[in-house]
Image (cartoon, coloured by chain):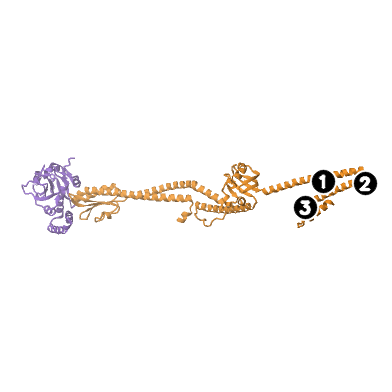
Chain colours: A purple, B orange
């Protein structure tokens, strides 16, 4: 995983700064030693999902940056901090935010709800009908109104999708994403 | 090869040339078409492979992004229907083989340059949101390109075969229209020249029909030279023979000009022999002479043999001639000219004249002689009658006797003179010329008269 991140960075930068990039990545590696590989994968998935999702144009009126929110402290957050750097999502700078108790989740474009969050149902319901891509790793996340649920299948991170919830939130998921889902729920067909 | 080609007959050369030319032309055309075919095919195939790689790059982007190798492999397996695809490999940006489809060849563990792939390869990067996730390599075999090239080559060879048949037919036709008349000509020349020894310089000039023709014509030319030499010798002999003859011998063309004259002309008319040839009769003989013989010339040119004697007033002097004209008539009846044989009979004519004069004189002489011989006979006859009548009268006898004696002496002298003349004319008397006095001669004559 470390190699992949390094490679991504190398592509996005100019050749003269490769040395600097290498030094920075080494520093990141040292800092991220405690992060579990699966959490790194989850973090990278969170950064990949927006590429296969269409938000309504209204979603970008409040903010020109991409608001990536987490609903509770979790290990993925650390991995995200490592990965984001100056990376862009859909051509926008990524702002990583931790939602506190009463923060409005509808300002987020992507909301990660870790299983550690106890009132999952509540915070997901608050995004109901708003253009927020909710991603969680709780067992009942999809039934609580979530759009994408991260799972671990045979030691690999995979995901399931609830299309009906996405429709309710007014976001469209690309077929490529659907094709990779281990299961799709709420299929209107 | 050059020697072998030179030895061929002309129609064989034509066939070989046609085959070579069509072979080269078709070979070039086939090679060009084949190259074009390969180039176009490769172009199309490369476009196809590149499009496939691009399409796959888009399709597998999500699978690569979410590290779903199985999904990526499943997408790659959509290439099953494309038999020419030998392998399709997806590498991540960190150089790992992520997924592969390997119906014919295995993917390398590391991504390699497109050029390192055998056959036709297409590469597309997998982009997602402006970032590269990896690359898709698709390799396709040349497939049936060699079959197409082979087909083109076989087509070319088949066309060449057709061209060969056509070329052979044409060559046969050309042979019939060119070589056969050439060979007939050569055979004719050979027949004509068969007696002469072939020119060694011409033998082997060319080993084909042209060579035969050259040798045959060489023989013919040799034969013509021999004949020419013979003719020249004959002409010299003819000139020698005719020059030696004491007559004019010539050949006059239809245009009235001399084509041949012998030396007699030079002697008669004072012009050099060679200057007369080519000049007209009118010019050489003179207007007066020509107008005299012109009717005979016209008759000869009409095809009649003419023979005549005539007195001709040549500019160099009048001659009495005997001429014979023999017309030179071609088989088709056309009179080309005539041969003339002219002899000078002036001397003969003069001799004849002299003889005739001598004869006339002799007749006159005989008449006078008869008369002179007859004169004494009358007194003799009368004297004899007187003798018979006189009887024994002595004076009468004396008178008559002296008359008879005188007449007999006269007669005897006449006969003697005649004998003398005869002796003189037959050359039996040789006159001696010497000087003598007139007195002696007169005395001698008086004495002869009185006694």
Q: Residue A168 in the image: state x and y as whole percent.
A: 13, 41
In the image, A69 versus B184, the foreground residue is B184
Q: Are marks 3 and 1 on the same chain?
A: yes
The image shows residue B346 at horizontal and vertical percentages of: 67, 48
Closer to us: A129 or B126: B126
What chain is tagged by disc 3? B
Name which of mark 3 and mark 2 comes first in the sequence. Answer: 2
Q: Earlier in the sequence, mark 3 or mark 1?
A: 1
**Residue B373 tag number:** 1
Visible residue check, residue B239: yes
Q: Is residue A1 left or right of residue B236?
A: left
Q: Sort mark 3 into few (<14), some (14-19) or many (20+) by Cα contacts within 10 Å.
A: few
Identify the residue under disc 2: B394
Please tell me in which quadrant of the rendered image residue A129 appears: top left
Q: Quadrant of residue B385?
A: top right
Tell whether label 1 touches label 3 (CB within 8 Å). no
- Mark 3 = which residue? B424
How far across and how far down the image is residue B365, in percent? 77, 46
Q: Are marks 3 and 2 in contact (CB under 8 Å)?
A: no
Quarter of the image with the N terminus of chain B is: bottom left
**SS state under label 1:** helix
Q: Considering only order in the chain, which callout, 2 or 1, is on the residue closer to the N terminus?
A: 1
Q: Nearer the viewer, residue B113 or B288?
A: B288
Q: Separation of disc 1 and disc 2 at Cα? A: 29 Å
Depth check, mark 3 against mark 1: the one in front is 1
Nearest to the eye among marks 3 and 2: give it: 2
Spatial CA distance of label 3 from label 2 is 44 Å
Question: Which element is circle 3 on?
Answer: helix
Q: Position of residue B419 (x, y in %)?
A: 81, 51
Q: Chain of mark 1?
A: B
* CA distance for labels 3 and 1: 20 Å
């Amino acid at each position: 995983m470390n190699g992949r991140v390094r490679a991504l960075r190398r592509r996005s930068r100019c050749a003269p700064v490769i040395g600097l990039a290498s030094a920075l990545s080494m520093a990141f590696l040292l800092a991220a030693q405690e992060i579990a590989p699966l959490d790194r994968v989850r973090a990278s998935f969170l950064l990949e999902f927006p590429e296969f999702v269409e938000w309504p144009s209204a979603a970008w009126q409040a903010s020109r940056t991409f608001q990536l929110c987490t609903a509770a402290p979790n290990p993925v957050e650390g991995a995200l901090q490592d990965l984001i750097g100056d990376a862009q999502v859909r051509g926008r700078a990524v702002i990583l935010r931790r939602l506190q108790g009463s923060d409005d989740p509808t300002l987020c474009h992507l909301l990660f709800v870790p299983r550690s969050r106890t009132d999952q149902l509540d915070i997901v319901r608050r995004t109901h009908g708003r253009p927020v891509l909710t991603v969680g790793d709780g067992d009942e996340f999809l039934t609580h109104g979530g759009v994408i649920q991260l799972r671990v299948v045979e030691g690999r991170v995979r995901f399931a999708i609830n299309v009906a919830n996405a429709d309710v939130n007014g976001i469209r998921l690309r077929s490529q994403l659907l094709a990779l889902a281990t299961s799709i729920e709420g299929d209107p067909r | 090869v050059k020697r072998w080609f030179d030895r061929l007959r002309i129609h064989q050369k034509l066939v070989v040339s046609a085959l070579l030319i069509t072979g080269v032309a078709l070979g070039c055309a086939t090679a060009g078409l084949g190259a074009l075919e390969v180039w176009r095919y490769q172009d199309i195939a490369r476009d196809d492979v590149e499009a496939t790689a691009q399409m796959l790059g888009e399709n597998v982007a999500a699978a690569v992004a979410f590290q779903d190798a199985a999904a990526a492999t499943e997408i790659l397996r959509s290439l099953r229907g494309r038999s020419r695809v030998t392998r399709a490999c997806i590498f991540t940006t960190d150089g790992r083989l992520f997924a592969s489809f390997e119906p014919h060849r295995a993917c390398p563990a590391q991504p390699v340059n497109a050029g390192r792939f055998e056959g036709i390869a297409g590469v597309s990067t997998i982009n997602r949101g402006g970032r590269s996730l990896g690359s898709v390599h698709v390799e396709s075999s040349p497939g049936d390109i060699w079959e197409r090239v082979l087909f083109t080559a076989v087509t070319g060879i088949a066309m060449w075969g057709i061209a060969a048949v056509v070329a052979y037919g044409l060559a046969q036709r050309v042979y019939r229209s060119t070589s056969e008349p050439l060979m007939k000509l050569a055979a004719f020349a050979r027949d004509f020249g068969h007696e002469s020894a072939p020119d060694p310089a011409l033998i082997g000039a060319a080993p084909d029909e042209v060579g035969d023709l050259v040798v045959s014509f060489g023989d013919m030319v040799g034969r013509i030279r021999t004949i020419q030499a013979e003719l020249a010798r004959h002409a010299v002999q003819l000139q020698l023979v005719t020059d030696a003859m004491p007559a004019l011998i010539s050949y006059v063309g239809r245009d009235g000009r001399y084509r041949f004259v012998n030396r007699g002309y030079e002697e008669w008319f004072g012009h050099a022999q060679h200057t007369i040839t080519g000049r007209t009769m009118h010019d050489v003989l003179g207007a007066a002479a020509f107008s005299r013989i012109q009717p005979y010339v016209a008759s000869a040119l009409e095809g009649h043999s003419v023979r005549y004697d005539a007195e001709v007033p040549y500019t160099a002097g009048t001659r009495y001639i005997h001429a014979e004209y023999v017309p030179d008539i071609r088989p088709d009846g056309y009179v080309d000219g005539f041969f003339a044989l002219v002899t000078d009979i002036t001397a003969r004519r003069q001799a004849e004249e002299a003889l005739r004069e001598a004869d006339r004189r002799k007749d006159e002489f005989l008449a006078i002689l008869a008369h002179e011989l007859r004169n004494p006979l009358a007194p003799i006859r009368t004297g004899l009658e007187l003798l018979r009548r006189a009887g024994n009268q002595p004076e009468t006898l004396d008178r008559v006797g002296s008359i008879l004696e005188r007449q007999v002496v006269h007669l005897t002298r006449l006969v003697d003179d005649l004998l003398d003349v005869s002796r003189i004319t037959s050359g039996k008397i040789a006159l001696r010329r010497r000087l003598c006095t007139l007195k002696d001669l007169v005395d001698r004559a008086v004495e002869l008269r009185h006694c």
